Image (cartoon, rainbow, N blue to C red):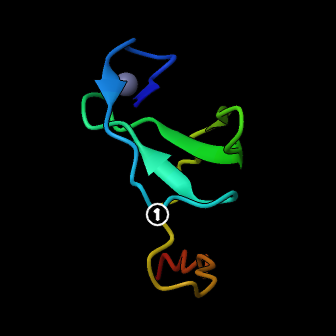
């Protein structure tokens, strides 16, 4: 069991969990990385807003023709 520091519910801990693994709270989708297993320490991962699905850089071309 591990407790989400965001919503304070308890989530099941995967018995095969390893250090460095990412846990996601079932309730609020907060992400935590396992720092150590004994004792269990988690680090809250900040959500990064990134909508760049393609990975390509899109630059506006500045088409601005009037006439
Ligand atoms: Zn939570």
Mark 1 Cβ and ligand 1 under 8 Å apart: no
Label count reads 1
Residue behind mark 1: 16
Q: Nearer the viewer, residue 13 or 62?
A: 13
Q: How crowded is mark 1: few (under 14 residues within 10 Å), some or many (20 or more)?
A: few
Residue 4 locus on image (x, y percent):
45, 23
Residue 13 place in picture, x, y as percent: 40, 43
Q: Residue 18 at x, y = what percent?
A: 61, 61
User: Could you tell me which quadrant the N terminus lies in?
Assistant: top left
**Residue at image x 63%, y 79%?**
59
Q: Is residue 35 left or right of residue 58?
A: right
Task: Give the vertical position of 63 relative to 33 (above or below).
Answer: below
Nearest the camera: 47 or 31? Answer: 31
Question: Residue 49: x percent and y percent?
Answer: 53, 48
Residue closest to the far top: 8
Task: Indicate whether 35 appears above or below 30.
Answer: below
For residue 2, which quarter of the picture? top left
Question: Quarter containing ligand 1?
Answer: top left
Q: Which residue is pictured at 47% across the width and 82% down the height?
A: 67
| Disc 1 secondary structure class | loop
Task: Write the residue at 59% across / 88% down.
Answer: 56
Q: Report the residue that reaches farthest toward the left.
A: 27
Residue under the point 51% across and 71% down: 52
Q: Of 29 and 9, which appears nearest the observer?
A: 9
Q: Check the image and report above or below for 1 versus 32.
A: above
């Amino acid at each position: 069991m591990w407790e989400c520091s965001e919503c304070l519910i308890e989530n099941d801990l995967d018995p095969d969990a390893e250090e460095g693994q990412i846990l996601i709270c079932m309730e609020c989708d907060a992400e935590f990385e396992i720092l150590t297993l004994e004792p269990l320490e988690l680090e809250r991962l900040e959500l990064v807003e990134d909508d760049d699905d393609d990975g390509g850089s899109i630059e506006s071309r500045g088409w601005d023709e009037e006439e």
